[in-house]
Amino acid sequence: MQALAMHLGHQSQRLVLNCLWTLRNLSDAATKQDNVDGLLQGLVQLLGSSDINVVTCAAGILSNMTCNNHRNKVTVCQVGGIEALVRAIIQAGDREEITEPAVCALRHLTSRHPEAEMAQNAVRLHYGLQVIVKLLHPPSRWPLIKAVIGLIRNLALCTANHAPLREHGAIPRLVQLLIKAYQDTQRQRSSVASSNSQIAYVDGVRMEEIVEGTVGALHILAREAHNRAIIRGLNVIPVFVQ
């Protein structure tokens, strides 16, 4: 991986892309690699590329390499990774091949490491909250929505994010997604019981995962009094009870 990383600044775009594709394939298995600080810094820089394929690969590799790796998380935060990922998400628009891995990387970077609180603040300071909440809405598909829900849960651990998340409409949308996903799971359970069919996945996501994620995010958001009032006003308590 270090050898491939040496070529990421090469003038040949084709060589850079081939290195990136190879790195992305390797990065699934490379979550415990050492001496990758230079690679991580290079990937953060490549998030600013004008080539969609380069940004897609860089985001995917960063997502894989920040999964359950404290050292890599700290390194990416220290070299400006939060700002670069937020900017990549803003510029990507509806391109889920970029937004999904970038959101997953942010989700990893905003939890369970020494710089996590800094990262939670940095997403807000770089104007990321509005675009992240927007990704909870169509045309986003379920894998992206699931990742965004997990990211919002982490962002809500920072009290300074509560008001802006509320102002951007995160709470009603999370409740809407919870109710829809819960109703879907109930329908699926009754059809599984009656026809012995399998639990359905939608784009590879089980609706139970959406229920779990939205409840988790609302649980953290409900630490704040204004948020509690909004949640109570959305008639979601019966769903929590069920």
Image (cartoon, rainbow, N blue to C red):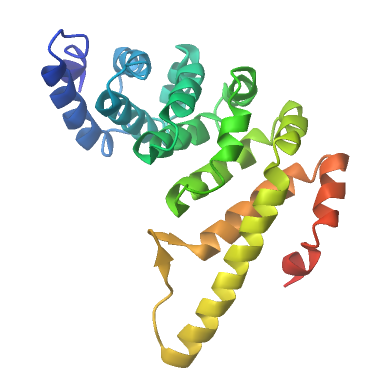
Is residue 111 something that shows in the picture? no
Vertical arrangement, residue 68 with respect to residue 82, above or below: below
Is residue 125 something that shows in the picture? yes
Q: Quadrant of residue 221?
A: top right
Q: Quadrant of residue 8?
A: top left
x and y percentages locating residue 99 in the rendered image: 42, 35
x and y percentages locating residue 34 in the rendered image: 30, 22
The residue sitting at 45% across, 37% down in the picture is 104
x and y percentages locating residue 15 in the rendered image: 11, 18
Quadrant, the C terminus? bottom right
x and y percentages locating residue 51 in the rendered image: 27, 21
Q: Left or right: 230 with respect to 90? A: right
Q: Left or right: 196 with respect to 163? A: left
Q: Quadrant of residue 91?
A: top left
The residue sitting at 64% across, 34% down in the picture is 155
The residue sitting at 51% across, 50% down in the picture is 146
**What number of labels is visible?**
0
Residue occupying the far bottom of the picture: 194
Q: Left or right: 98 with respect to 139? A: left
Vertical arrangement, residue 105 with respect to residue 153, above or below: above
The residue sitting at 62% across, 26% down in the picture is 120
Quadrant, the N terminus? top left
